[in-house]
Amino acid sequence: MGLFGALFTGVSALTAQSQNTAIISNNIANMNTTGFKRSEAAFFSLVTTQGNTSRYSPGTVTANRIQRVTQQGAISQSASGTDASISGNGFFAIKRDSEDSALTEFLYTRNGQFSEDAQGYLRNSAGFYLYGWPIDQSGNLPSNQGDLTSLSPIDVAFLGGLTRPTNTADLSINLDANEAEELLADTPTANPDFTRGLTVYDTLGNPQPMSFEFVKSYGPSATEATTRATLTATDQMVNDLGLTDGDQFTLSVDGGADRVYQISAVDGAALPGGVDVMVYDISDIIDDINANVTDMKAFLGNSGEIVLQHGQFILGTENFVLAEVGAGTALASIGFTAGTYTSDNLSSATFSNGTPADTPPYSTEDFPTMQFLPGDPKYNSHGWWAMTVKDPSNNTITTGMLNFNGDGSINALSDSQGNIDIELNNINWNNGSDLQSINVNISKFTQFASDYTVLFSDQDGAELGLRTGIEINREGFVVAQFSNGASSTLYKLPLVTFANANGLSEISGTAYSETENSGEENLREAGSGGAGYIEPSTLESSNVDLADEFALLIVAQRAYSAGTKVINTVDQMTQELLQLR
């Protein structure tokens, strides 16, 4: 057996080196194949054990193929937004077809050269379909994202374009603190002090120009102001304003006793019986109310009008009554209207969005919460604005009150999400689009004594746009981009990891299938759980080093030549044996 055993050993050497050469050749042939992973030949000896040490029976050699799947290939730039490579561990999940069926086997690849086919599916250069997690409207992944059944073929086809309805808007506006204040009527004024337009987009992609109107007001408390303006505190009732000496009027608060005021042409005249105050000039009215009438205050407005205001600033049963005495015309001559004034007369118009709370913090349904009390240092009676939001048809969407602190900042508390906004709910544009809700951020509203200024305005909606491209980003999201600047996140690509990736079974087209040696698949988000990162607009080259392969090829060639020499030698020895006589 020794001579023929040596022959068999030489033949096995040729076979093993042929296998080695085939592996090297395959590596060299695929050195430019995207995502290709090289293999190596590992040789080991098959030895026949002999019990007699005086006789030797030669064994043979065989070659096993070892895959270098985990060896990273070089990453190079690509001009395509749908190309992607993996830096680190993991594979893309692919299938041979787009049928989302459990009967079709999942395969795994590092070939990220994806492009859109005629049906809108992403397929790599080997023709395999890319799979990923679909993203719902809230941006969430499937609840069973750890299972392969949660994956769907990446379909980026759109029959039309994409609209993005407005959900939020931001306004930064300064309102002029020097604006003359007005009494609020049952309907918002037709001539607002300031108007700002903002175009938003409905669910059909139509532009909807909204308007925000502002009116400087005395606030929502019971208030009355004279129609006469340009008054000063020193204006005399008789000599300057032409009132009749001796005329009287009364003021009562919350159903209390009347306080009687009498017009006097003489400063410091004695009080007649039943009269509480002699009024020589305007300051006599203002000073007396502020000093002696509980829960009332009086002041000259920005236009020089006398303003009477209930001290409890909002709602409840607060009221005051102005009345002429006898046939006198004192109130009318100053510019007041006799009557009863309550905060309830204002709330229906001023707070059309809901009745405000009558205890701190004060709030309404749509407008932000206010927090202060009369007498609080933050309380600013000259910081009130009626704000009305209107649709393109000039219909009122909501109306409410804003208040500003003495430092010019808006008096508002953040909601549970930390926002200061006006919540416009269930807007009906009357054009067939869905009801729409928009939150308008007003945290940067200010009131300073300067011109009306719009620092910036913005909103997150967009008109109808056509799809302009698809890209895969570093987090693995598949994002569609549109001509209107909008984008839509469609899928997220998982990275599939294995305990022993080198144990995968190679399938045609740089695809691999799971085996017992590889272990079960694990679906990971990029950058988590030991998975690598997705590098957008790049491709992973093969991990073949041409210099190494040529060196191995030379060694294989010499080993093969040596094997042939063994066979040739045994052949000569056999020939010598056969020539024996």
Image (cartoon, helix red, strand yellow):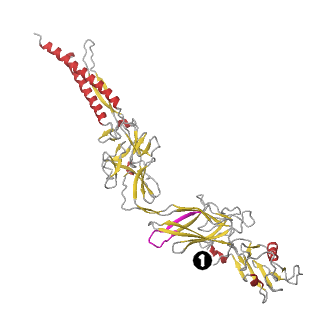
Q: Which quarter of the rendered picture does the N terminus lie within? A: top left
| Residue type marked 1 | Ala
In the displayed image of the protein, which residue is found farthest to the bottom? 327
The part of the image, by quadrant, that contains residue 399 is bottom right
Vertical side of 280 occupied by 58: above or below: above
Q: What span is in magenta?
A: 426-441
Q: Does 292 sit left or right of 549 as displayed? A: right
Count neighbours of disc 1 (C-alpha within 10 A) and say few if under 14, some if 14 to 19, many if 20 or more. few
The part of the image, by quadrant, that contains residue 213 is bottom right
Residue 261 image point, x, y percent: 82, 81
Q: Does 424 sit left or right of 71 as displayed? A: right
Q: Residue at label 1?
A: 190
Residue 62 image point, x, y percent: 27, 26
Q: Residue at x 26, y 11 (%)?
A: 54
Residue 571 image point, x, y percent: 17, 17
Q: Does 51 sit left or right of 80 as displayed? A: left
Q: Kindly tell me whether residue 217 is visible in this rendering.
A: yes
Q: Which quarter of the rendered picture does the C terminus lie within? A: top left
Q: Residue at x 22, y 23 (%)?
A: 11
Q: Kindly tell me whether residue 41 is visible in this rendering.
A: no
